[in-house]
Amino acid sequence: NKELLGGGDEPPATAVTGPVNEIIYGPPGTGKTYELKARYFPRYTDIDSSAAQEDRLEALLGPLTWYQVSAAALHDSGNEPKKVTELAEHPYIRAKMRFQNRHSRPDQTLWGNMQAHTLPDCPNVNYGSRHEPYWFWKDGQARWSLAGDWEETGQDVIDVVSQLHELPQMS
């Protein structure tokens, strides 16, 4: 049948573009599995339901740390300053919670991770053990935003957000 073989007037709905037989290789711990989940699952997996969309979010965001997912959510929001309670409702944060099978609110986790990665000269965070990367800033109204050189050191997070924006949207 001409239509089954893809010879019809319209291209097949699941046409694959780019290389299909690509080998990902390298020593242990170099990000092969992360690369596979982050780059290739979205390209070669159909999204047929909102459950599949949630699975895709979890596959891309689950391997990230909490501070990386927090940065992804702020970046996705146009870096508009947000309170932790607002940030906790972002789909990226909710996907990370599902990935970890957590049912309680993530507020304390978000606070702790963002405080640990807040610029050292931020006067609104009283947290002694800050460490790099310094990506966050907290204003006087307890709203968080991205700051410092986060775009330089957080390119992997920016790439994940770009991949998430490329996903087909559910209607």
Image (tube, grey):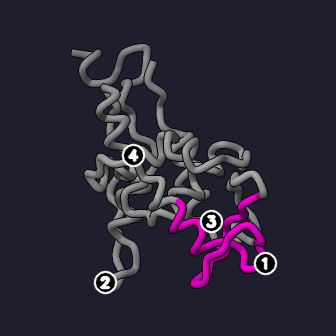
Residue beneath disc 2: 28
Q: CA distance from mark 2 to mark 4?
A: 27 Å
In the displayed structure, does residue 156 sit left or right of residue 98? right
Q: How many marks?
A: 4
Mark 2 secondary-structure assignment: loop
Q: Label 2 is placed on what type of residue? A: Pro
Main SS of the magenta part reads loop
Magenta-colored span: 111-139
Quadrant of the drawing holding the N terminus: top left
Say what amino acid the circle numbered 3 marks: Gln
- The residues tagged by marks 1 and 3 sit, at their Cα atoms, a distance apart of 23 Å
Instruction: Look at the image and say whether residue 168 sits in the magenta stretch.
Output: no
| Relative depth, front residue between 114 and 142 | 142
Of mark 1 and mark 4, the one earlier in the sequence is 4
Residue bearing the label numbered 4: 95
Residue 25 location, quadrant: bottom left
